Amino acid sequence: MQDNSLWLGSMRRPMKLAMVGFTTLTVLIYAWLVVNKIFSTDAIGMHEMIRPSEGGFVVILMLICVAGSLVTASLYLSDFKGQIEPDKDGFFDIVSLVCSRLAMISVALIVLVMFYEVVSRYVFSRPTLWANELSLWIAAFVFLLAGQYAMQQRSHIRIYVIYDIMPRWMQKTADVISVALIVGFFFALVYGGYNDAMRRMLRMETFGTAWDPPIPGTVKPAILFIIGLVTIQAVSNLIADWNKMPEHHNPADEIDETEIENIRRTLEEDTK
């Protein structure tokens, strides 16, 4: 099992145990909160979840368990290589892979939140005040982290019509210019948005709704931080690709053989 490890090695099993432990605690505390909500009039709800000082020890413990579950799951899953993922070759690739797994888990969380809202609204006629805001909150981080993953996978938009006919030294020059533009954009973003981001974060600016989550106070600084990670990943790609042989692209490169095989297998199963 450790032979296929990308980077955890002997730590894969302890990380898996930590992930299972945090996830189990999260589920148990959540079940207790749900039962308490049914039978108690002063039960802890989502209002207290973003106000730990009001919720007390249980809310703090729940938030720690949720954070531990997300972190350990992201670290554990980043140790597995996807079928269509290239081999890691940059000094920053592991960080981006961990962030990508966090984004993937977050997509599942959005689905769970919306499923809860649909059931609560249309089955029990008790719509929530927080589902929409929580979905937006999570989706903002998914969007940002997905950009970092796209940079690591080299799956962002690139136009190869001119790039492929360049000699290698000119391709390297183009790569340096593109990375320099990314670095310049990051510094311009920090220069123009740092003060505003810090102001919103320090006062934990809220969204102004009934649930009132601190979306501006968390997303604004996250934009600067994650764009910084994207910039480091771009520099990592430049260094990793510097001595590689030139690549030539054609429309066949866009064909995903794994996806075609999965479609073929599904069609064969349907015809049986």
Image (cartoon, rainbow, N blue to C red):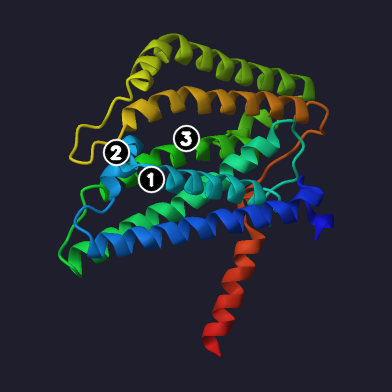
Q: Is residue 251 above or below residue 92?
A: below
Dot 3, crowdedness within 10 Å: few (<14), some or many (≥20)? many
Kind of element beneath mark 1 = helix
Whether residue 84 can be seen here? no
Residue 65, given in percent of the width and then of the height, sits at 50, 48
Q: Which residue is mark 1?
A: 59
Residue in view at x 58 percent, y 82 percent: 268
- According to the image, label 3 marks what residue? 144
- Left or right: residue 192 compared with residue 23: left
Give the mark nearer the N terminus: 1 vs 2: 2
Q: Residue at x 35, y 26 (%)?
A: 217
Q: Residue at x 42, y 53 (%)?
A: 109
* Residues at discs 1 and 2 in contact (Cβ within 8 Å): yes
Q: At 32% across and 43% down in the image, what residue appears? A: 55
Q: Which secondary structure lies at badge 2?
A: helix
Amino acid type, residue under disc 3 in the picture? Leu
Which residue is nearer to you in this view: 272 or 94? 94
Picture quarter with the N terminus: bottom right
Residue 230: name its quadrant: top right
